[in-house]
Amino acid sequence: MSQTEPLLEVDDISKSFDEKVGNVVDQVRFTVNNNEIFALLGPSGCGKTTTLRIIAGLEHADSGIVKLAGRMLCSPDKSVPPEQRGIGLVFQEYALFPHLSVLNNVIFGLKAIPKPYREEKAVEILCMMGLRDHLHRNPHELSGGQQQRVALARAIAPMPKMIMFDEPFSNLDAVLRQSTRDEVRALLKKAGMGALLVTHDQEEALSFADRIAVMNEGRIEQIGSPEEVYYRPRTQFVAQFLGRTNLISAEADGEYAKTEFGNVKLDRPAHGKVLLSIRPEHLTLVGAEDGTPLSESGEVVTKDFKGHDITYRVRIRTRECLVHTDNMLNYEAGARVIVSPLDKAVVLEDIEQTEEIPDYHDIL
Amino acid sequence: MLIPLLYLVVRALEADVSESLDLILRRRNLMLFLNTLLLTLGVLLTTSLIALPMAWITTRTRIKGKAVLTLLGVLPLAIPGYVLAYALLGLSGTDGTLARIFGLELPRLSGYWGALTAISLYTFPYLFLNLRSGLLGLDPAYEEVARSLGYRPLRIFFEVVLPQLRPAYYAGALIIGLYVLGDFGAVSLMRFETFSYAIYLQYEASYDRLYAAWLALMLLCMTGFVLLMEYRLLKGLFFHRTGSGSKRYPELYDLGNWYYPSWAFIILIVFAAVILPVTTVLFWMLDAGDSGIWSGIGGSLYDSFRASAPAALLAAALAVPLAYLGVRYPSRTTKGMERMAYLGYATPPLALALALIFFTLSSAPALYQTLTLLILAYTLHFMAEALGPVRSSMYQISPRMEEAARSLGYRRFRAFWNTTLPMLRGGIIASVAFVFLSAMKELPITFLLSPIGFEPLAVNVWSYSIEALYAQAAPYALVILVFSSLFVGLLFAKEWKQ
């Protein structure tokens, strides 16, 4: 894949709405390959939607360039208007035209093909989406999931080079979200279309995208496959944003670092003061025998039984950590346990922990 | 918009200083000022006394038939002030309706009290509607908190509810205040000398344009003062619901012994404001028999129509880009443009008409006394009415619609034309209807700017009434009533939908 030219190239784009506030999008750079689903993931206000709107041509970047299939879309001295970019858009609120029927919404975008063939093409794509029975309905008569599919059909029908989604699934309820996500993913793969997804939902990004860029305060902190960004976060922000984690300040000495729960193996050699991230599911509990010194064991503070798994809060000396186990390990609050790592700890680029661990906020 | 008003100043300053001072410092001006002020205050007080209890009864009590009562509260808007004045005059006196049917001879209402009654009964629904939506919009949590702190309902009303109603009250009072300052029909029929009436007398009777210009400027100053006061009073007054979540409705009170008096109160007001004038109009019409009073109605209707319809279309056509820019690209410039539209509405109609006359006479004499000028004047004056509905439907259309169209290959203007414009249809139709119906019953502008031989409905009602030819005025008044009932129907439909 690296041999061929990427589908979308975003190079060093920056944008500021108000000079006092600074850049909303700050030197963002990434590429999307042919047939790849790429996600921009970050909290609200991180600049991900602005990035999408710059690529779509709905906002103008202050600097940087955007190329689609080798064609310059925007550079400091040139900007192709949105209608000539050939990028399909699916909005969070779908933006279906309320004055047009489902069929006419799709036909609306098919102005490039001769009039007599438009309806046929629109019907074909709507049937593919399972909307055969809803062709002549008005958008407001459809359920959220159906509206979502019409919006997707409308964006796909003109066969754009790429399609972009802005928080596409956040208006759907949990059950529908999962199934719609799977359907859309299968459809994109079948159509062989590259896609860019913008979302604040880490689970959505992890399960939907082939690659993820995690954004924070206008900058991209890390780009990688879902497994990479989840298991090997580079920064404290990425580690915390993608799920619960234990952040541990420790003294590293080559392959190992000394922590509250003994010596832990590191994912890369380091020396001196380091900040480590260990996911709760990479820790497990062992019952402490009577002779174990208090300094080496911990006490179960709370046990949160969730059916197929259990989350424990364990206090070791002065600090607490989260441990995620299957439901076979059963300790009650107050039990003495030893916490032991199942996997290597990840050495983060940050050295000091910047704030309280947010993972505990929802418990306390 | 501003240019014609500047011409008013130019015209006024043409006189030399001593002459101007002489015109400004006349004792008569002080009298006119006091008359205008007293009438404004009197109308505000009267309408408050009518509208506040009415709004409270129809929103916060367990009275039956709230929809009917609300409709009754809006209905008086269907009887324009000059028609009401005409009816009050035709009703009383030795040859009035009451005297002829019941032998009941009431002294003829005129002067201050006549003008006060006619204008109050016509305008109070503006305050009623504002207070009503104010009351419906209040967060019941404030009252519940006050109750939990041990306050009794009556004290809560005065100390919690009333203060929060201030923005709604000021909004309604502003409309009424501006109306009183601009009213010409009712005060002239009642022969009560306010600025507007004096401008007319000066302009029409003595052709003293200079003094008329000065009077118009003084009236504009009063209007400016009212707007400024409104701005000062509203500044920093923002009341929102503090809680999130869905809307809750406040506790409703039982009227107890006051149940029937409440109904009676509303019916009495509506009787005076609607039934009496309508009966009077019908009475005079029947009384005239077939004496040919209907002969002029067709031509008159046509004259009204060919001035009002183009104005309505023009105002709506201008309102669309104005609302679009104001909502999509809010900036100082676009806000300023919208304010201009409201300024046109606030400018007393006679002052506006006079300014347009001076303007055309000096820079476009070909326009003077043409239908075009009348249409332009209506458009300037009623632009704000067109802007309202278009703006509110504009707010409901997500900018994402046009962006979606653009991503599907439509250019900027085509994207607007194919998505936003069709969605604005409802708002545009409402705008056209409001401006059309308002222009049909408009009197002062029509009066001053009608081309020679042009006899629209409103002007005919007024000129027959002022000559005490009540029977001749009746058919025109009746047609006006039909159009203004449509206006009220539209307003009520909009209110009830909320």
Image (tube, coloured by chain):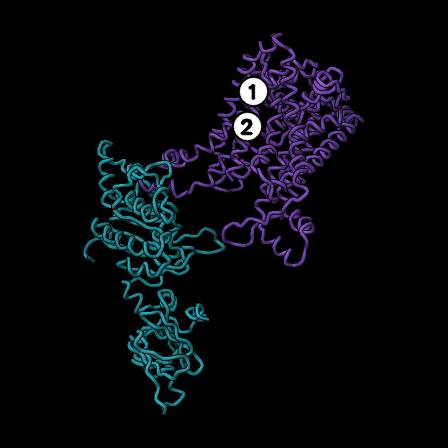
For residue A346, which numbered disc appears in the image? none
Give residue B213's position: percent from left, percent from top.
Answer: 69, 24
Q: Which residue is mark 2?
A: B487
Q: Is residue B14 left or right of residue B298?
A: right
Label 1 secondary element? helix
The amino acid beneath tag 2 is Phe
Which quadrant would the N terminus of chain B be assigned to in this image? top right
- Which quadrant holds residue B451? top right
Q: Is residue A152 left or right of residue B215?
A: left
Residue drawn at point x = 64 percent, y = 48 percent: B161
Q: Which residue is mark 1?
A: B373
Give residue A12's position: percent from left, percent from top.
Answer: 34, 55
Q: Is residue A307 left or right of residue B36?
A: left
Q: Which chain is purple?
A: B
Q: Residue furthest bottom?
A: A291
Q: Name the colour assigned to chain A in the rendering.
A: cyan
Q: Mark 2 vs mark 1: same chain? A: yes
